[in-house]
Every structure is written in structure tokens, then in C-alpha cells.
Image (cartoon, helix red, strand yellow):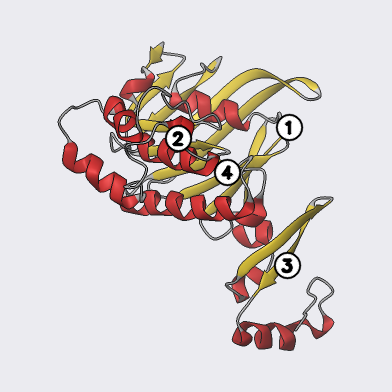
Amino acid sequence: MIHCQLNKQLRGASGIFELNIDAQFPARTFTILFGESGAGKTSILRMLAGLMTPEHGLITSQNQVWFDSSKKIYLKPQLRKGAFVFQDQGLFPNMTVRKNLEFAQRQSNQKKLIDEIIELFELGDLQHLSPINLSGGQKQKVALARSIINQPNILLLDEPLSALDRRTRLMLQEYIQKAHKEFKLTTIMVSHDLSEIHKITDRVLKLEEGVISEVTVETAFGETNKLIKGSIISSKAIGENIKLEILVSREAYEMLEKRSKDDDEIRLCK
């Protein structure tokens, strides 16, 4: 489990504000962190990764202290047993996909592990290409594969699906979920689009005015998430709400039809 108490003055869209949070991330859970742009979501990830220093606070992981301002403890990023995937993949353009993975390894001569990760992420046809020949989604898939090459305990994802088309985002979600389950990770992902990641998260944390609060999955994604499993074919933000068009099975349709006669939030189309 990760426990963090973070305090830092940040500059957001409305000016300077104070980030002051106390949050826990249970082991092997998948947490979505969301909020308005400039609310400090990425800053939280960077502080957990050791790339930004809180002014005051404490970060512990599995009884190991990563940061403690009162005791002047600061564990370097490479010692935190975590991995960070940025929006900008940061791949080396002069190396092939495979060489990018090999270069990221802290322990050399682990060919078997690289082969397993290449198979897991279906990179076999891409492993001898350079990143310049890859699409945006393929680059992000390689960045995700590279992030787990050292078998981290914690995976930090900073809006890895942004700037990708819908089909590619859905594909990347599957690989993120694969990595999370296969390597038994504690995953924290920043996202601004809740409508497309509701199937992969265990919990949702909302960051607002420098304070973090837990939102139930049902509240974040609507009561219909309890009833149906379908494919989202479109989404549209309307104020604080999200309008979804969902393609469902006949069985789910019949369940919703019975329930929704007096429900203004559900519209059914055959």
C-alpha cells in the first residue's frame, strides 16, 4: 500500500493554490485520479515518482519511507520500485523497439523477460522498427511495455490515452489492464475522460481545490454500470455529467427497458 501526505503550493488555471492531500492506494488496486486541468493531478504523480519534492509531507510504500520532510528523507526515483508513463513517450528515436526495452533494463541479460513482454504487448512485428516508424498508439504501447521491464510494484500513468483516437484508446486500455493484472501492480492513472475507462478501474479519486476525495464507481459512472456491460460508441460532456451511447446485448436491453420507464436518465433505442 502507498500512503501519501502531500503539501505543496502550485500554480493552476486560477492562480496559486495549496495542494494538501492525505490518500492511500491499496496494493494491486487500479485507481483513477481525475479533476479539472491544473488541479495538481500530474504533480501528485510526480511527487510519488520522486520527480517533484513536496514542501511538507510523507510518502511510504510497503513500510518503506520514500519521503519524510520532518526527517529529511528523500529516496531517489530509481530506488522507489515504480514506473512512470508520461503523455510524451520519451522513446529513443535512434534505437529499435527492442533496444529501447533492453536499454531500460537495470539488470542486463534478461532476454526471456523481454521476450515475454514483447509477447504480452504483441510487439513482435514492431520490435526491430525504430519509433519514428510507429503510430502514436504503437509508441504508447512500447512506452507501457518499457515501463514494466524492471517489474515495478507501482505504475503511474499520466493521461496515457490523450491525443489518441477512440479505437486506439480502447486498445491501449486492454494492454494497461493486462499489465496491471499480469504484474500485480498498484496502478494510479490520471485521466480527464471517465467515460472510457470505467471498465478497468477499482476506485476513483477526485481532486478539487487542492483536496482529494473518493468517489464511488457507481457515482462516477452512473447506476447503469451496475446493470450492463456494453461498448461505449460515443460520449459527450454536458456540464458535470457525461452522456453515453452504449451498445448492449438484448438481455441487458430488456433489463433496462423494464427499469427505465420512469427513469429520465436512460433513453433506449432499438
In the image, 109 versus 193, the foreground residue is 109
Residue at the spot x=40%, y=31% of the render?
130
Earlier residue among tags 2 and 1: 2
Earlier residue among tags 4 and 2: 2
The secondary element bearing badge 3 is classed as: strand
Query: Quick check: 47 above or below 145?
Result: above
Write down the residue under mark 3.
245
Write down the residue under mark 1.
209
In the image, 255 versus 234, the foreground residue is 234
Amino acid identity at mark 4: Leu
Q: Residues within 10 Å of mark 4 (few under 14, many from 20)?
A: many
Write down the residue under mark 2.
3
Would residue 8 be found to the left or right of residue 259 on screen? left
State the image coordinates of residue 174 (x, y, percent, origin top left).
46, 55
Q: Is residue 30 visible?
A: yes
State the image coordinates of residue 182 (x, y, percent, origin top left).
32, 52
State the image coordinates of residue 269 (x, y, percent, origin top left).
78, 80
Q: Quadrant of the N terminus?
A: top left
* Dot label at residue 161: 4
Select label 3 or label 2 by which is in front.
3
Q: Marks 3 and 4: in contact by CB < 8 Å? A: no
Between the C-alphas of marks 2 and 1, the distance is 20 Å
Q: Residues within 10 Å of mark 3 (few under 14, many from 20)?
A: some
Earlier residue among tags 4 and 3: 4
